[in-house]
Amino acid sequence: MRSHWKPVIAVLLTAPFLTELLSGNLPFSAFFQPQNYLFLATVGYGFPIVLLREFAVRRHLGLAGLFLLGLAYGIFNEGILAKTFYLSANVPIGTFSGYGFTFGMEIPWAITISIWHALHSFIYPVVAISYFFPKDRETPWLTARAISCLAVPTAAIGAVVFLLPTKDHPAGNHGLLILMLALMGLLLWLAARLGARAALGGPHKLRSRAFFLGALAFFLLLLVPILLTFVKVPLWFFYGYNLLLVSLILYLICHRRCLAINEVLLFAVGDDAAMAAFGLATTIAAGDFQRIASNTSFLLLFGWVVLWLRKSAARDGEIT
């Protein structure tokens, strides 16, 4: 039986980089503290991402299903581990503080950050690992025993983190925990219903516009919501904008039978590169040298990935 430990380790090691470090949520000094990185590489990102990827492969889900699984991960990350859904003040992006806080939840923030996690924390790492490990792309990585070894500590530690108070967040209540689990279960069920819509196929024709569409996604999915909350548009407008955007995303995905994995990866690089460029601009203005170095390194990495994709496509005569 073929061993799949290499792609599993790759997910565990790389997923936190494309989220916590790229977003600037954690500086270098905090990110690389052994206890922080160990938590992020396992329960924080690695274990749940691998488990959701396993769910997707075993049910032959396409990109639309992956998006819904990513939303479920966003709920796990921000609604259970970080508990930022329940902040009325000091939300990680300050423009959301106090905007649309209803029934004990900062709903506009929950929507925006869950969509962000669906892409950056789940789809992009899974697509990248699938591209660079093509022989492991369509096969399960874990045995039933390995699934239990990852799922049990993830669920247990997640519940403990949620229910215990920290210096930044009060203890979560059981009702909200049940609600988060119910929403995650609903998203997994819907993902299974969508099935293989927009299957990820092997590398094919590489259209450069995918990179620019990815950069546009960063603007539409993150910067526009921030702007809307900054000017305090009516809530119905904010919710309508997000509903329209998510519906459009699912429509564009679902009407495609198959998407080339190298094109999806190029889209991801465009989104990530736009975030790194935006972060570089803001950190230069602030004089934050740690984040300047971090964002510059990411831009160099993404430039290398683009060159790699173009070189591979040129070798096969598949650039347009």
Image (spheres, rainbow, N blue to C red):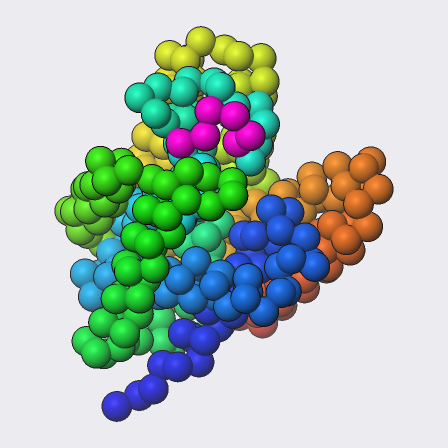
As for residue 90 lying within the magenta part, the answer is yes
Residue at the image position 72 percent from the left and 55 percent from the top:
294
The residue stretch that appears in magenta: 86-91
Residue 118 can be seen in this image: no
Q: Give percent across and percent down for residue 158.
A: 34, 55
Which quadrant of the structure image shows residue 176? top left
Measuring 62% from the left and 51% from the top, which residue is drawn there?
A: 26
Q: Position of residue 182 (x, y in %)?
A: 19, 41
Near-viewer residue (103 or 258):
103
Classify the position of the N terminus by image quarter. Answer: bottom left
The chief SS type of the magenta part is loop
Q: Is residue 68 above or below residue 201?
A: above
- Residue at 33%, 40% (x, y): give it: 172
Numbered disc total: 0
Relative vertical location of residue 205 with respect to residue 89 in this rendering, above or below: below
* Nearer to us in this view, 172 or 199: 172
